[in-house]
Image (cartoon, rainbow, N blue to C red):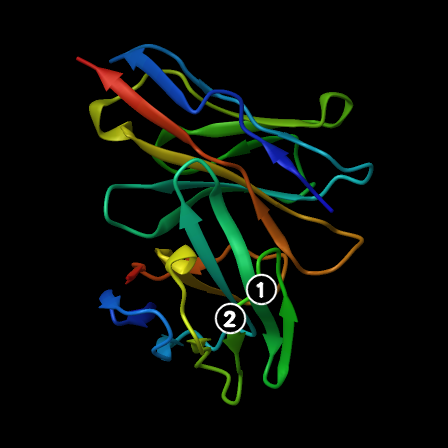
Amino acid sequence: AQSVTQLGSHVSVSEGALVLLRCNYSSSVPPYLFWYVQYPNQGLQLLLKYTSAATLVKGINGFEAEFKKSETSFHLTKPSAHMSDAAEYFCAVRATNTGNQFYFGTGTSLTVIP
Amino acid sequence: EAQVTQNPRYLITVTGKKLTVTCSQNMNHEYMSWYRQDPGLGLRQIYYSMNVEVTDKGDVPEGYKVSRKEKRNFPLILESPSPNQTSLYFCASSFGGSQPQHFGDGTRLSIL
């Protein structure tokens, strides 16, 4: 079975600082990779998706993620944090070679300090 | 408007009383799925469906049933709910198993 690890259940950054949220997956074959954001009392919204077309993926709201096969990582970054970025972020994977099941990480709660 | 609609949004019930959470999508998506979200555990997939009459178990299927008789609907059934099924549930859909999923707003279930 796949697994997804998000290091750091809580991350705090100052407004304007770099945001870095980490995601590592376990798979010998690169899976489909996604980042979702969840605002309080809402469902999840897609931030970006890795399609294998490019290793650097740009998403909405200024977020981007870089796929690194050698490190089995798909970390999410944003150059300058905004107060509105405060939310829960989830990394998700779906294997490309076995089944149609999705696996989510345990989430990272981002706090932005004014 | 493209959306995934879950009902009810909130439900408090008692152990053993059968309940159904409905999920409907208006995007003609083939893939539909149910998740439960628990603190510290993230989202865990309960069941998914690749198309009508095709369903498969996810990571935590015990105590749940699903059916997919129509493309747009994917109800989640708890035949004999227990307190450990108290959770926040999300339905999601997509065009295929590899495409981004659209999520409903969630159903908060409390089983006493």
Can you tell which quarter of the image residue A17 is in? Answer: top left
Q: Amino acid at mark 1?
A: Pro
Q: Chain of mark 2?
A: B
Q: Amino acid at mark 2?
A: Tyr
Residue A67 visible in the shown view:
no
- Give the x, y percent position of residue A13: 32, 12
Tell me the crowding category of disc 2: few under 14, some 14 to 19, or many 20 or more residues within 10 angstroms, Cα based.
some
Q: Residue B55 vs residue B86: left or right? A: right
- Give the x, y percent position of residue B1: 28, 70
Can you tell which quarter of the image residue A83 is in? Answer: top left
Q: Residue at x 41, y 49 (%)?
A: B37
Query: For the residues marked 1 and 2, what is the alpha-carbon distance in whole angstroms?
Result: 6 Å
In front here: B68 or B112?
B112
Question: Can you tell which mark lies on residue B64?
Answer: 2
Residue B39 visible in the shown view:
yes
Name the secondary structure under disc 1: loop
Name the secondary structure under disc 2: loop
- Give the x, y percent position of residue A90: 46, 38
Tell me the crowding category of disc 1: few under 14, some 14 to 19, or many 20 or more residues within 10 angstroms, Cα based.
some
- Give the x, y percent position of residue A60: 39, 38
Q: Residue at x 38, y 75 (%)?
A: B16
In front here: B5 or A7?
A7
Q: Residue at x 74, y 60 (%)?
A: A99
Question: Can you tell which mark lies on residue B61?
Answer: 1
